[in-house]
């Protein structure tokens, strides 16, 4: 007959017994589960007021007894039912799970089940029950909790795309609530130690934090930002770091000042040591102001000490100071300018674990609002083509969503100021997000959610980067009556200023729709780049929600859930930055953007990617003033023919501040492979002379490759090149760039048109810098922060 239903949700021991009866009856009828069978005992965990340390006694043992008692009875009653079959089909496959919260974090607990018993425990069982337990394959059971037993790619991708992966600080706190530090130490074979700083000591560097900010070394360090002709890193870090330190000196909490908090815990010596390290690092920064690597090492020491102080003092209340700091930046403005958020609109800020967590929260909020209004969660979404791939992918991979891509280029006029109306040609399939296919597609219904950005990150197939006119795009969506009654626009502001002119104009344009409850605007960004001044010492993203709260109550409730906010050290660090550093983070962005424009403006025209350019090396064009990268391509060839390794070896050999970390927004220039077809160079805050070296590199390598190409192609266009000839071409390129010197171009002028690109002699690649052999697959560089080797009198740089 048909299999009996087995209820996997267990709220009582009796209910578990009924489910076991159904499993045994099905097995007797020849119907056994062919996969792991999971019982959710979360309700039982709550009903028995259980705690993590009592799970085995309160949950596991009673349920094991129920199962073995019923299984032994079933074997006696039914002669056809074999013991080994029962063990293999059920006891090896049944698992218990508990979904609970620890420290406001969702946690999955897996209670032990059919664990080996002690002799005393075995004496309490019948021989039949012990025989069953003896047959259990514990290796098979333990596979359930091993990460490698699951499809790690799908599991990892799902967690990242959904924003479900919790932050490391929250995970650590939750873990310590389940396993004590003493148990962790014991399991690791480590001895417990205590901090021996109790009692009065005479070790005093500064009487207080305030006194630190009054010292001569502090003032001299701050004044580095005022020096004429200083490199961009000198214009930002001394003043920003000094303001953050002064902010800590001004902290007043219920427990007093920073000094009071440390004194109350009898660890004043720890704070005094931090004062010493920071003052020593200020002196080091002053002495190495001409060397970006050595200078940044000293800056990181200061910020590391501030991080330690914030971790201990925790001066900021969760969800208050961070939000106030961001809102203050959006609601105030410099003289003569309007604030980003106009009067009458009330922004709300949420600190999330990442930009993708922000996107996931926005999506969940839209779903919650639609369910409250219409009784379903079937979202019609629109995403701007070339929006950051992870955001677009989160929409595309959500099965209940209907996703359409909006091609913003179709709304541009022939001239820069002209705009076109939205037509069916601009609405394409979501396949255009990933594989470049353009197929017409209309939205399933009125659009609930539009995910977009004014300033693109790198794109896989874009050849020209321009500012997206999101204001015009949204106006057209309203005019064409394509939006739902409650329409949400989510704007990725990662590559934009906090005090953004684009956002200011956008909110002013749609203030009425927002106030009337027809439209909700959510600004989101990854805070792991620019918002940390490139330090990368905290983590997170955040959202700014601007809507009529009475119309979007379900959305606002979901996005502001307490358990969906970042806490701990990351929140303390970001709150401190929001309180005392938002003007500096915007200036940090401006300086990176300016250096990118400086480098791009002086590239040879032959490097610029155009439809009729057959040059091997091509760099995508841009007229976006916020651009922070060079999009480097080798159309028709592999970038691995030698450029990747050669560029790294050249930069390291010339002592440039240069890393290969899988991100961007750092103080040093950063170089990464994107996909398999292009490279991204994010210029850092180096001096004009350093930027000149990069210009010289691209200028000379372009000439070398063009000369090699000319001899190989013999006048033929790339499109006419037989594929069989490509290996020979790439071999020739490798040979051409194995030994050459780079001419440095002066960049003292503002741009190419100024006529200031007089070539000067530049250093060749140093023989001591061993160049990695080019290969078909470039090495994955671990991207550590740049460090100077200790004790190197010659100043050798170690990356």
Image (tube, rainbow, N blue to C red):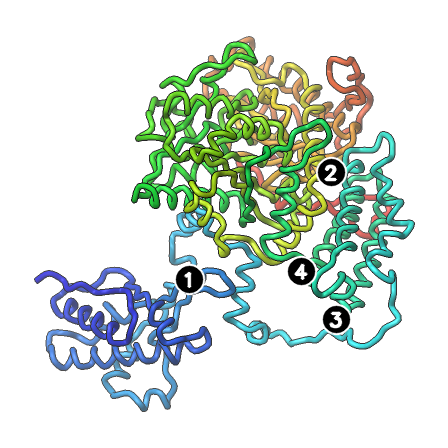
The x, y position of residue 107, in whole percent, is 45, 62
Residue that carries the numbered disc 4 in the rendered image:
314
Does any portion of residue 667 appear in the rendered image?
no
- The 10 Å Cα crowd at callout 3, few under 14, some 14 to 19, many 20 or more, is few
674 sits to left or right of 422: right
Q: Nearer the viewer, mark 2 or mark 4?
A: 4
The x, y position of residue 456, in whole percent, is 55, 29
* First-in-chain label (3 vs 1): 1
Helix, strand or loop at label 3? It is helix
* First-in-chain label (2 vs 1): 1
* First-in-chain label (3 vs 2): 3
515 sits to left or right of 631: left
The image's mark for residue 146 is 1
Does any portion of residue 497 appear in the rendered image?
yes
Helix, strand or loop at label 2? It is loop
715 sits to left or right of 22: right
Q: Quadrant of the N terminus?
A: bottom left
Q: Which residue: 50% across, 44% down?
A: 358
Is 156 located above or below residue 546 in the figure? below
Distance from the alpha carbon under mark 3 to that under mark 1:
44 Å
Residue that carries the numbered disc 3 in the rendered image:
264
Foreground residue among 34 and 355? 355
Distance from the alpha carbon under mark 3 to that under mark 2:
42 Å
The image's mark for residue 657 is 2
Residue 658 in which image quadrant: top right
642 sits to left or right of 67: right
């Amino acid at each position: 007959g048909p299999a009996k239903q087995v209820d996997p949700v267990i709220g009582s021991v009796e209910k578990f017994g009924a489910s076991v009866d159904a499993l045994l009856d099905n097995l007797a009828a020849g119907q056994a589960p062919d996969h792991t069978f999971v019982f959710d005992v979360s309700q039982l965990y709550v009903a028995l007021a259980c705690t993590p340390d009592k799970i085995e006694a309160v949950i596991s043992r009673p349920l094991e007894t129920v199962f073995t008692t019923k299984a032994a009875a079933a074997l006696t009653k039914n002669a056809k039912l074999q013991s080994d079959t029962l063990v293999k089909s059920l006891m090896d496959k049944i698992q218990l799970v508990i979904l609970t919260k620890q420290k406001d974090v969702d946690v999955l607990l897996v209670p032990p089940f059919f664990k080996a018993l002690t002799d005393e425990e075995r004496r309490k069982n019948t021989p039949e029950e012990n025989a069953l337990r003896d047959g259990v394959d514990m290796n098979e059971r333990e596979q359930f909790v091993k990460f490698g037993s699951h499809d790690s790619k799908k599991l990892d991708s799902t967690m990242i795309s959904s924003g479900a992966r919790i932050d490391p600080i929250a995970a650590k706190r939750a873990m310590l609530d389940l396993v004590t530090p003493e148990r962790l130490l014991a399991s690791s074979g480590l001895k417990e130690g205590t901090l021996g700083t109790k009692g009065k000591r005479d070790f005093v560097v500064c009487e207080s934090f305030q006194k630190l900010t009054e010292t001569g070394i502090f003032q001299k360090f701050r004044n580095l930002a005022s020096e004429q002709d200083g490199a961009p890193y000198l214009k930002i870090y001394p003043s920003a770091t000094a303001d953050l330190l002064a902010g800590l000196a001004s902290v007043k909490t219920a427990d007093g000042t920073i000094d009071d908090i440390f004194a109350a815990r009898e660890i004043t010596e720890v704070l005094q040591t931090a004062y010493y390290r920071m003052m020593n690092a200020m002196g080091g920064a002053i002495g190495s102001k001409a060397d970006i690597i050595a200078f940044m090492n000293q800056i990181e020491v200061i910020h590391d000490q501030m991080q330690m102080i914030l971790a201990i003092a925790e001066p900021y209340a969760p969800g208050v100071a961070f939000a106030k700091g961001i809102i203050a930046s959006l609601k105030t403005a410099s003289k003569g300018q309007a604030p980003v958020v106009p009067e009458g609109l009330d922004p709300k800020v949420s600190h999330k674990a990442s930009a993708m967590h922000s996107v996931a929260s926005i999506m969940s909020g839209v779903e919650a609002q639609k369910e409250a209004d219409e009784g379903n969660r079937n979202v019609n979404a629109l995403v701007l083509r070339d929006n950051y791939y992870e955001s677009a992918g989160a929409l595309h991979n959500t099965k209940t969503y209907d996703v359409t891509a909006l091609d913003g280029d179709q709304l541009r006029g022939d001239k820069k100021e002209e705009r076109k109306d939205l037509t069916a040609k601009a609405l394409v399939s979501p396949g255009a997000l990933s594989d470049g296919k353009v197929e017409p597609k209309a939205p399933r219904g009125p659009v609930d959610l539009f995910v977009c950005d004014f300033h693109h990150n790198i794109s896989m197939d874009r050849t020209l980067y321009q500012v997206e006119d999101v204001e015009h795009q949204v106006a057209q969506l309203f005019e064409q009556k394509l939006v739902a009654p409650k329409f949400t626009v989510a704007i990725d502001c990662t590559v934009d200023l906090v005090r953004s002119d684009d956002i200011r104009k956008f909110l002013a344009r749609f203030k009425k729709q927002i106030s009337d409850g027809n439209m909700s605007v959510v600004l989101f960004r990854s805070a792991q780049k620019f918002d940390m001044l490139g330090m990368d010492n905290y983590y997170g993203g955040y959202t700014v929600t601007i809507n009529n709260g009475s119309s979007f109550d379900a959305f606002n409730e979901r996005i502001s859930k307490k358990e969906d906010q970042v806490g701990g050290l990351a929140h303390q660090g970001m709150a401190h930055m929001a309180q005392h550093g938002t003007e500096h983070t915007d200036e940090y962005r401006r300086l990176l953007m300016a250096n990118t424009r400086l480098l791009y403006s002086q590239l040879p025209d032959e490097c610029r990617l155009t439809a009729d350019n057959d040059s091997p090396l091509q760099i995508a064009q841009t007229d976006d003033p916020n651009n922070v990268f060079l999009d480097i391509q080798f159309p028709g060839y592999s970038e691995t023919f030698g450029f990747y390794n050669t560029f790294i070896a050249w930069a390291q050999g010339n002592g440039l501040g240069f890393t290969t970390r899988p991100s961007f927004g750092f103080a040093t220039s950063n170089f990464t492979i994107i996909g398999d077809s292009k490279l991204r160079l994010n210029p850092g805050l180096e001096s004009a002379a350093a930027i000149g070296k990069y210009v010289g590199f691209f200028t000379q390598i372009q000439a070398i490759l063009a000369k090699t190409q000319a001899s190989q192609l013999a006048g033929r266009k790339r499109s006419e090149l037989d594929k069989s000839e490509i290996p020979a071409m790439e071999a020739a390129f490798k040979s051409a760039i194995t030994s050459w010197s780079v001419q440095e171009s002066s960049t003292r002028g503002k741009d190419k048109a100024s006529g200031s690109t007089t070539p000067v002699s530049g250093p060749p690649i140093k023989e001591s810098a061993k160049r990695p052999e080019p290969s078909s697959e470039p090495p994955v560089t671990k991207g550590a922060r740049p460090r100077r080797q200790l004790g190197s009198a010659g100043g050798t740089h170690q990356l």
